[in-house]
Amino acid sequence: MDIFSKYLKGDRAIWLITLFLGVASLLLVYSSIVTLAYKHSDGNTLRYLVRHGFFLLSGFGIIYITHNIKYNYFSRISQVLLFASIPLLALTLIVGTNINDASRWLTIPVINQSFQTSDFAKLALVMYVARMLSVKQDEIKDFKKAFLPIFIPVVIVCGLIFPANFSTAAVLFAACLVLMFIGRIPISQLISLASIGIVFIVISIGVAKFAPALFPRAETWVNRIENFSKGDQEGNYQVEQAKIAIATGGIQGKGPGNSTQRNFLPHPYSDFIYAIVIEEYGLIGGFLVMFLYLMLFFRAIRIVLKSPKTFGSLLVVGISFILVFQALINMAVAVNLLPVTGQPLPFMSMGGTSIWFTSVAIGVILSVSREVDQNQAHEIPEKENNELNNQEENELAVA
């Protein structure tokens, strides 16, 4: 375990969880991309495996680099990141790549790689909210000085994400509410912020019902909710295929690479990868994956309780909440507990830059953990020295 003490700092359990998720992702993505490979690469699955492996390996590199950065640095750059994310989100709505009436991606010209600007905005907003809550603790009850500087960016960022990606905006909005509650923002102000979110949703549903051409994406949300509530099998084709995958997987599963529903299930390598987990590795594998995400959250809360600084604690709470809540939503959709949302499984679903942003998030958590461990290591010798000094003083007093 010398490698941990020398190179990999921070919580060892989080490192091991991330490593396990990465290996599982490689196996599952390779198994589920057969249909995609035949459609676009003449059956060349190796191309997708190498590409996904590159993003995973570079993701671990990002985690390593990020976890060596002092987390106070993220407080300093949070405002810059936030101000950069807002025009990027606006640009995505205007000229972003449009898929299923949703404009979520921007393409980087030189490398021709698309990325979801909402992934960048999530990290930026959580860092900013954590910073503002820690800085404004002495005047946290003041509406103008504390609440408004947080309220306005949250509404703007979530509002820009909302038209193309309702579920991501909802998860981010919920994470900000949790942070603000922990950061001692008055309940009355939190209720007002939550009310604005509800109004957004109600207006969107109204537009979808009476003027769907103005907001076609809202009509998709309404249809998904209606199909889910009615149990419409044709409307819930994705979920029905996921149910078949789960049912045929049983307790022990069919074994690695033996999935059949990957040929029928839309996006088995991303949105519905959890159904492939259960089909190939059974309920045992499904519960193991869920346990790992819950353990990740538990270890993050452990870091929060040990962190001496408000910013570090809030930063870990916000990031871990988004990662784990998103994972639970993905699993709930696969087992038909929630309507289809399009949320990937963090660090397991196939993705390019989304893996990188998840890696940054995990690296930030480990950065806080690393400094917590270093502070504790310095405190132990000081405590021992104080005990020795007290013992010597007592002996001298007796003499």
Image (cartoon, rainbow, N blue to C red):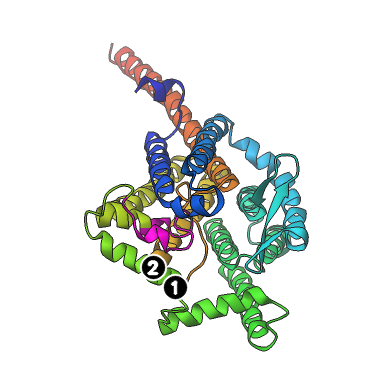
* Labels 1 & 2 near each other (Cβ < 8 A): yes
Q: Is residue 113 left or right of residue 302?
A: right
| Residue at 64 percent of width and 36 percent of height | 73
Please report the bounds of the magenta region as a residue range: 258-275
**Residue 320: x %, y % from top left:** 48, 50
**Which residue was labeled with disc 1?**
237
Q: Pick whichever, 338 or 105, lies toward us.
A: 105
Q: Is residue 54 left or right of residue 165?
A: left
Q: Pick whichever, 258 or 316, lies toward us.
A: 258
**Residue 56: x %, y % from top left:** 50, 38
| Residue at 58 percent of width and 73 percent of height | 191
Q: Is residue 276 left or right of residue 365?
A: left
Q: Quadrant of residue 263?
A: bottom left
Would residue 336 be visible to someone looking at this image? no
Q: Quadrant of residue 80?
A: top right
**Residue 75: x %, y % from top left:** 65, 42
**Which residue was labeled with disc 2?**
241
**Residue 28: x %, y % from top left:** 39, 48
Q: Pick whichever, 286 or 294, lies toward us.
A: 286
SS at mark 2? Answer: helix
Q: Residue type at mark 2?
A: Gln
Q: Quadrant of the N terminus?
A: top left
SS at mark 1? Answer: helix
